[in-house]
Image: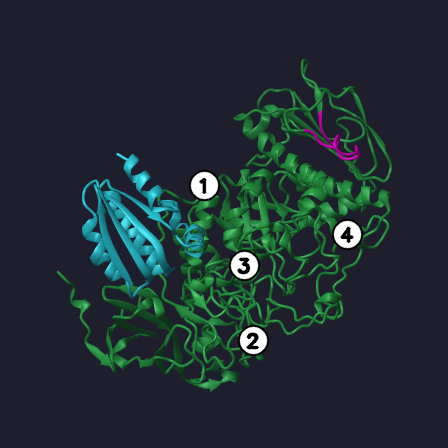
Amino acid sequence: MEIVIESLKDIRIASITGEINSRTTSQIEADILPLITPNCKLLLNMRHVTYMSSAGLRILLLLYRQINDQSGQVVLVGLQDMIRDTMAITGFLDFFQDYQTIEEGLGALANWS
Amino acid sequence: MKRVDFYPTHRHGDFLLRAGRPYPFGASFVPGGVNFAIFSRYASVCALVLFEKGELQPLVEIPFPTEFQIGHVFAMIVFDLDYENIEYGYRMDGLYRPHEGHHFNQETILLDPYARAVNGRSQWAAQPTPNNPYPHRALLPYDDFDWVDDHPLEKPPEDLIVYEMHVRGFTRHPSSGAKYAGTFAAIREKIPYLKDLGVNCIELMPIFEFDELENKFISPLTGAPLVQYWGYDSINFFAPKAGYAATGRYGMQMDEFKALVKELHKHDIEVFLDVAFNHTGEGGEDGRTISYRGIDNKTYYMLRPDGSYQNFSGCGNTMNCNNPVVRNMVLDCLRYWVAEYHIDGFRFDLASILGRDSAGRPLANPPLLEAMAHDPVLGKTKLIAEAWDAAGLYQVGSFPAYGRWGEWNGKYRDCLRRFLKGDEGQVAEIAQRIQGSPDLYTGRGTTASINFVTAHDGFTLADLFSYNEKHNLANGEDNHDGQNDNYSWNCGWEGSTDNPEINALRQRMIKNAIAILLVSQGVPMILMGDEVGHTKNGNNNTYGHDNELNWFDWTRLESNAELYRFFRNCITFRKVHTALRNQAHFRHEDYVGSGYPDISFHGVEAWQPDWAYHSHTLAFMLDGEHARGGLEPDDTIYVAMNMHWEDHQFSLPRLPVHQKWHTFVNTSVPHPNDICTPDKEPVLANQKHLLIAARSVVILVGR
């Protein structure tokens, strides 16, 4: 798994490539937790995530909870169909706003204050 | 500061270990590792067997050293497991002496009775890998679902309208249009349907892990192998059936089912589970060893003195429910489903078995039933007994209730069926049944009675009026299986027909049944599919059919829109009228000063019911001022039931001045005037007399 982090104004964009499972969640914690600061705006680009295990879903929800604690905002972008279905069916998607394109995701974050 | 027990003390190859905690049983996460704890009174040795997910051969087998045993519990912490990619089981050894009740065999890898998720049948009916030494494998899942503010709904039982449903059957038919047909996720897609129908509780036929491939019969009609479709042969009581989850192959069935419960609760629909603790899927002497038999046969099963299995369930074995260890397992299990899955109620299959002692004798004060009734976690959970078993114990009306238990009222079903078809000698009894069976449930209130006319066992409502006899050849047992006492009537022709008169009569009989069911005091239960006239072609025991016999056909919503509308409006009517949903039994007197008793009975003459043996007519009136003890006044409701084969003129009881009778239902009138939208009922032209046609029900509202 690979994580690339970019910044656009006050928004942090984390693009993840590969599988999110119990073997890779520690890398998510290491790379993304430091981005969670008061009022942070985070866009997770999931376009190149090919699989998310149960542990993967849980790490996303943990990120959400911590961002919430810091009054921040997170959006998911480009979820592949199978992963999006899995998230919807298991209830995890209820916690997130998700968008098809990065532009839409950035727009949603920019409009949020 | 880290805890001392964060550090391993032992090692087995690359695996770091420490003595575990004997409680809780099962596999639980502890700092840095997983605590494995399993009970066996008679095993001499035990090893934990770990597999990498899907591998045929074990990754490692770790014997429990003596210092990891406390009492009859083997307990060990294994550190640093990649828990998501591990399946675990146990290997035990001890005596193999079946005549003494011991079945230890160290060749078998055993499923933990406390496993919370089980792999192996994660896609419905997919052919398993051959030569798998461990076909049903325990997983290590997290119970950390984010319920936010969800909570069991705790609806008053008298307000419930229960819908008995099979998870797969509800959406498996291609006409369902569900994306993941036959799954928990698909039920979630269909919540708008349930809301439209108006039911507020779904009772799911068994969802504990079972082996759908375990059925030795072949359909003589199609040559296709039958399956274990209904799912009453559980192989584990803590794990939801993975094959019912769209995400089962990813091991996410727990989250999927919880998400369904949460969403149903959000839409004000309760969730009951039909639970079969009376036996397991391990069968009898010729059965397979999956778990209990190999772990502690003598504790988990009721045995005869020669070590053979008692068979009060008709399924080969009987769980030893009043053994203290098994009793605790059942309680742990129920608490788990309430605490972790927010389940609202349970219906206990063949519950009378839960009241037998270890030798099979019925107990006056069964410890398991008493413990459930008084359990703190189950304090607000609905407990419903199927108050009989397969060995002749029949406890409808006498099931040990402890002020808590309700019962599937088999006498309601039988009496209503006989009254409907025109049997003699039913009028006096049906009067009791429509009141919530006070003759059976004195002091327990109306909600002790779960009223139903059909359930998964037996005919559907459409078949009840299309067949005199069961037609079970498709089950592969020469029509020997299934009940013979169906109290059904084919209306003049056995099976489907083009005869419009017979079909109209059948439709009317179905309407009569559902109208009476939904104006009876107690908790009504409807069988999935009856609302659209589902047929099983006269088969009254379809446990083995994964086909149209058991699949809800969604095209019938259009082709039988007439019946669907009738059901829906009857359900709405019940919800609108508090007079139909009393918690207490009637007192047969006027205690609010309205001038009318709370309930009164009538015949063709008002105030003169005909209780004679040959009578087929009865009417009753519920005084609106007495609804819910006078606390929630309602309109007055009059129900006339003419189950005679001739028309009768009924004189109507007089209402207080300024009130008039309005017609809600007249089942003899063709669609769409058979039923109204509740609260929009038209005034009845003749307020004094009403001709009630043969075999029909009329419901009037006085306001």
Q: Which of marks 4 and 1 is nearer the N terminus?
A: 1
For the point 52% across and 72% down, the residue is B302
Could you give the CA–CA distance between mark 3 and mark 1, rounded to whole angstroms?
A: 23 Å
Label at residue B309? 2
* Kind of residue sitting beneath label 3: Pro
Q: Does the magenta stretch include residue B186?
A: no
* Kind of residue sitting beneath label 4: Ser
SS assignment at label 1: helix
- Per the image, the residue denoted by label 1 is B266
Could you give the CA–CA distance between mark 1 and mark 2, rounded to whole angstroms?
A: 45 Å
| Mark 1: few/some/many CA within 10 Å (<14, 14-19, 20+) | few
Chain B tint as drawn: green
Could you give the CA–CA distance between mark 2 and mark 3, rounded to whole angstroms?
A: 23 Å
Q: Where is residue B681 in the image (x, y as percent from the top left)?
A: 68, 24
- Per the image, the residue denoted by label 4 is B488
Q: Which of marks 3 and 1 is nearer the N terminus?
A: 3
| Mark 3: few/some/many CA within 10 Å (<14, 14-19, 20+) | many
| Mark 4: few/some/many CA within 10 Å (<14, 14-19, 20+) | many
Q: Position of residue A27 (x, y in %)?
A: 24, 61
Could you give the CA–CA distance between mark 4 and mark 1, rounded to whole angstroms?
A: 39 Å
Q: Give the range drawn in magenta.
A: B663-676
| Mark 2: few/some/many CA within 10 Å (<14, 14-19, 20+) | many
Q: Which of marks 3 and 4 is nearer the N terminus?
A: 3
